Image (tube, coloured by chain):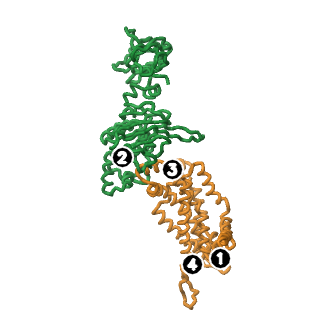
């Protein structure tokens, strides 16, 4: 390993011509540094540029501008078959005319490996994905989950430096998907190779990744650990895309140090002691963001700042949580209350029309620049 | 009766298959039996049939002759065996050349931009709108001594001051082969195109990803996955080529006689339906044998039919 980074994208742009003849940047000045042995995810909804970015690393597409580096080497127009990366395709792309064994052996034969070596490595790869004994089947004779494992083994048997995974679990049912998430993560840790994982499923990204790049409209919105992107989203898009958030529009009233008071017109009140990021100035319009599980509900006013009266408009009991929807002077907020105590009496839950007090703790609240 | 039909699944099946069964029986089984009966008969001088049982027609077809030059009672006359052999080898050659021409074309169409694909397919189909015989006559215009090819060749040779005598292309086995290849090309292009077009593009990417260059991808992925198309096309080409007589009639003249011509002449010119029937049945058996061994090895290309 010559480079600190397994894969690096420097200021990469990919433009396509749309069927209408317009130019569109699918990937718009993306820079990413993916470390050796990292489980890195690109997360975003469809059309955000995550798959195009992955395909540029694989070599199926070439950047219009910028450069992709693998192990420190600029890739330029290097074709896929000369890159030390392998891909697990969303559709699996298994060779239907070949058996499982032949599918796995394909890549090794291309390397010119001998028959004995192929046999040994294919056997080990099949063992790794728990498909021993399936080697003579054709892909069509396997279940979706098994086909997915064949696709994984076919890429891993080549012992790539970097494994690229394009929504590999998308076609599996929920239960199998969750099992495979943990299995993939365990496999990655065991093998120690770099995984670049493309998904639109935030839970999947949070479960498996060391770091996540949240993408939208061809740009990286935020890059960080799962904790960072969830607890400290850098903008409204990320706060909204990952998990759920309440947003209150406000205006900075005063700043002292890195704490500020924010006036919220919809609550007709001021939030004090809010920590702000650099670059926010007095008088600026901001979004105050708080996660639904981080708002506290109290029956009566305690001696505390940042408390507001609100009326319960709806409650939904979902077992683990109770979702409480409230109206505070016209501002609609959602609150997830964890059901920590077992109780059956409906009267002990919040009821519609009930008056409550909400507490927004400064350490749980984020002040974000308006986009 | 109706009660039984309502209850029994197998009775329903029989009932539903009845129209097809009748159709097959009237149009296929009965004519075939009639041909078989006639082939064992004897001809009358005016072209009628005496119904008897003799294998004379078959022995004659395989070379047994009583009309011998040196006064022997019987001898081997290779005339008809040669015709059978010529038909078989022409069918093989035609299929071979048709595959060679059709595969690259189908590949080109399948990999073309979707918008252009329909146009190319249309171009492949256009000749089929013209009558089969007229298309063969067109080749006669091209190939004959005063035809377009000789005129162009002569003009080019004249430019370089090379003496040129028009080529004798018409009424040769080569002319028949060219005509056959031309006539049956679309029947090979379309199934190969269908099977190529069905290959998921991600498979090419997967092959490249696993280290295969363009040549290896073609040999290991594209070609095997398009084999059903080649097999289906081969069946569609080989069988009709075995029996056609129009192409050899027009482009081969009296020089290139195939089984098809033999059968046609027995019925129309020689007025010997018994011998014609025997030749028909032998043609059928030959085609069946080749097709049987071929499909046993490669299948029917059914993947393409199912899709």
Colour orange maps to chain: B
Dot 2: what SS?
Answer: loop
Chain colored green: A
Find disc 2 in the rendering and name its residue: A160
Q: Nearer the viewer, residue A280 or B110?
A: A280
Can residue B143 be seen at all in this image of the molecule?
no
Query: In this figure, which residue is indicated by the disc labeled 3?
Result: B9
Which label sits in the foreground, 4 or 1? 1
* Mark 1–mark 2 distance (CA, rounded to whole Å): 66 Å
Q: Nearer the viewer, mark 4 or mark 3?
A: 4
Q: CA distance from mark 1 to mark 3?
A: 79 Å
Task: Determine which residue is flagged by label 1.
Answer: B163
How crowded is the residue under tag 4: few (<14 C-alpha within 10 Å), some, or many (20+)?
A: some
Q: Secondary structure at mark 4?
A: helix
- Of the numbered discs 1 and 3, the one sitting upstream in the chain is 3
Tell me the quarter of the picture where residue A293 sits.
top left
Q: Nearer the viewer, residue A329 or A175?
A: A329
Q: Earlier in the sequence, mark 4 or mark 3?
A: 3
What crowding class fits label 3: few (fewer than 14 Cα within 10 Å), some (14-19), or many (20 or more)? few
């Amino acid at each position: 390993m010559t480079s600190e980074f397994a894969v690096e994208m420097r200021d990469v742009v990919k433009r396509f011509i749309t069927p209408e003849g317009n130019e569109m940047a699918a990937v718009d000045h993306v820079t990413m540094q993916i470390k050796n042995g990292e489980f890195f995810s690109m997360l975003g909804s469809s059309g955000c540029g995550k798959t195009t970015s992955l395909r540029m690393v694989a070599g199926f597409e070439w950047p219009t501008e910028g450069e992709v580096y693998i192990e420190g080497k600029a890739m330029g127009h290097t074709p896929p078959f000369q890159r030390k990366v392998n891909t697990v395709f969303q559709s699996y792309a298994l060779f239907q005319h070949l058996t499982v064994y032949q599918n796995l052996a394909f890549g090794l034969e291309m390397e010119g490996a001998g028959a004995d070596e192929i046999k040994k490595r294919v056997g080990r790869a099949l063992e790794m994905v728990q498909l021993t004994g399936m080697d003579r089947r054709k892909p069509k004779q396997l279940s979706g989950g098994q086909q997915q494992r064949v696709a994984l083994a076919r890429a891993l048997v080549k012992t790539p430096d970097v494994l690229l995974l394009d929504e590999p679990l998308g076609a599996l049912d929920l239960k199998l998907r969750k099992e495979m998430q943990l299995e993939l993560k365990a496999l990655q840790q065991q093998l120690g190779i770099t995984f670049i994982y493309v998904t639109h499923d935030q839970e999947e990204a949070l479960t498996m990744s060391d770091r996540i790049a949240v993408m939208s409209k061809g740009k990286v919105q935020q890059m960080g650990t799962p904790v960072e992107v969830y607890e400290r989203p850098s903008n409204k898009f990320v706060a909204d895309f990952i998990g759920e958030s309440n947003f209150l529009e406000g205006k900075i009233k005063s700043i002292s140090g890195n704490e500020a008071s924010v006036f919220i017109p919809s609550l007709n009140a001021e939030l004090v002691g809010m920590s702000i990021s650099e670059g926010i100035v007095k008088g600026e319009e901001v979004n105050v963001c708080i996660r639904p599980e981080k708002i506290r509900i109290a029956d009566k006013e305690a001696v505390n700042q940042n408390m507001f009266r609100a009326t319960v408009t709806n409650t939904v009991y979902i077992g683990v949580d109770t979702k409480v929807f409230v109206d505070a002077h016209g501002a609609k907020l959602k609150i997830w209350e964890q059901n920590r105590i077992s109780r059956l009496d409906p009267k002990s839950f919040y009821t519609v029309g009930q008056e409550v007090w909400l507490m927004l703790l400064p350490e749980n609240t984020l002040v974000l620049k308006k986009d | 009766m109706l009660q039984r039909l309502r209850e029994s699944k197998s009775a329903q099946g029989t009932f539903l298959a009845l129209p097809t069964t009748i159709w097959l029986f009237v149009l296929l089984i009965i004519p075939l039996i009639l041909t078989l009966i006639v082939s064992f008969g004897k001809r009358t001088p005016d072209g009628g049939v005496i119904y008897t049982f003799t294998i004379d027609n078959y022995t004659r077809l395989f070379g047994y002759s009583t009309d011998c030059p040196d006064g022997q009672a019987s001898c081997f006359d290779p005339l008809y065996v040669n015709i059978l052999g010529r038909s078989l080898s022409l069918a093989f050659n035609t299929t071979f050349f048709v595959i060679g021409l059709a595969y690259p074309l189908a590949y080109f169409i399948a990999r073309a931009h979707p918008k252009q694909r329909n146009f190319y397919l249309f171009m492949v189909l256009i000749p089929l709108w013209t009558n089969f015989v007229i298309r063969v006559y067109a080749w006669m215009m091209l190939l004959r001594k005063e035809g377009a090819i000789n005129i162009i060749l002569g003009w080019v040779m004249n430019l370089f001051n090379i003496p040129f005598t028009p080529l004798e292309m018409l009424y040769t086995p080569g002319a028949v082969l060219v005509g056959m290849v031309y006539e049956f090309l679309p029947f090979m292009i379309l199934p190969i195109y269908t099977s190529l077009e069905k290959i998921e593009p991600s498979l090419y990417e997967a092959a490249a990803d696993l280290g295969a260059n363009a040549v290896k991808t073609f040999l290991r992925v594209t070609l095997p996955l398009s084999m059903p198309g080649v097999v289906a096309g081969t069946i569609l080409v080989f069988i009709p080529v075995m029996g056609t007589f129009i192409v050899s009639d027009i482009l081969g003249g009296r020089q290139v006689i195939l089984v098809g011509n033999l059968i046609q002449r027995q019925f129309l010119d020689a007025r010997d339906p018994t011998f014609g029937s025997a030749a028909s049945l032998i043609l059928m058996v030959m085609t069946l044998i080749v097709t049987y061994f071929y499909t046993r090895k490669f299948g029917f290309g059914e993947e393409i039919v199912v899709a």
